[in-house]
Amino acid sequence: MLPSVTAPQSLLSADERAAIAEIEATTSILQLVTRLTNMRFAGIAKFTDHKWVVCSVHDTVNMGINVDDALDLETTLCSEFFIDPQALFIPQVSQNERFAARPVVKQYAIESYAGAPIFLPDGRLYGALCALDSRSMLFDDPNLSETLSLFARLIGCIFFANLTTDS
């Protein structure tokens, strides 16, 4: 069964939309993530209680994941950050028993994944920075985990500086 995709406008607040639109740095970070990982999709997602909400994407292969899309959080690979809040790299998803059967993997033909949790400076888990591709990838750069985590930290600071306390 494929996960449901919804595009409810209410899952991103006006302040969050303004922060995304206002800060060109997030687009530049996503472009850098695709270059560093050699992957063709990078995105920033926000977590709600039950949803994974797309905030921003850089997509050179038209994976079909768009801003404002929302997936059931537990179906995503990024949900792993609730279990282990460390950068996660899956070079060949189809060969990984833990992740291969997830509906989102089949829906978007995800074969490789790289991601890091986005924490706000106050310590709250906000969402994830992730890169996806339908090709398997070798993650041989020993600094990639630290680099993705630094980008995620920067994104968290950008959001925190632009969000009001009610978000």
Image (spheres, rainbow, N blue to C red):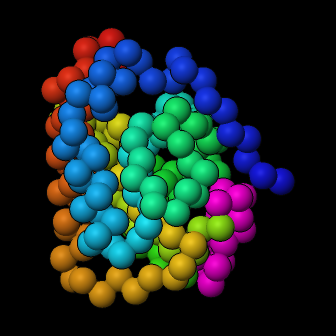
Q: Is residue 45 above or below residue 144?
A: above
Q: Is residue 83 visible?
A: no
Q: Nearer the viewer, residue 82 or 1?
A: 1
Q: Is residue 103 above or below residue 57?
A: below
Residue 62 position, x and y percent, is 55, 57
Q: Main secondary structure of the magenta part?
A: helix
Task: Report if residue 97 lies within the magenta region.
Answer: yes
Tell me which segment is drawn in magenta: 93-108
Q: Nearer the viewer, residue 132 or 40?
A: 40
Task: Report if residue 65 lies within the magenta region.
Answer: no
- Quarter of the image where one finds residue 5: top right
Q: Is residue 48 above or below residue 83?
A: above
User: Residue drawn at (52%, 63%), measured in percent from left and top?
Assistant: 61
Q: Quadrant of the N terminus?
A: bottom right
Q: Nearer the viewer, residue 127 or 111?
A: 111
- Quarter of the image where one finds residue 124: top left
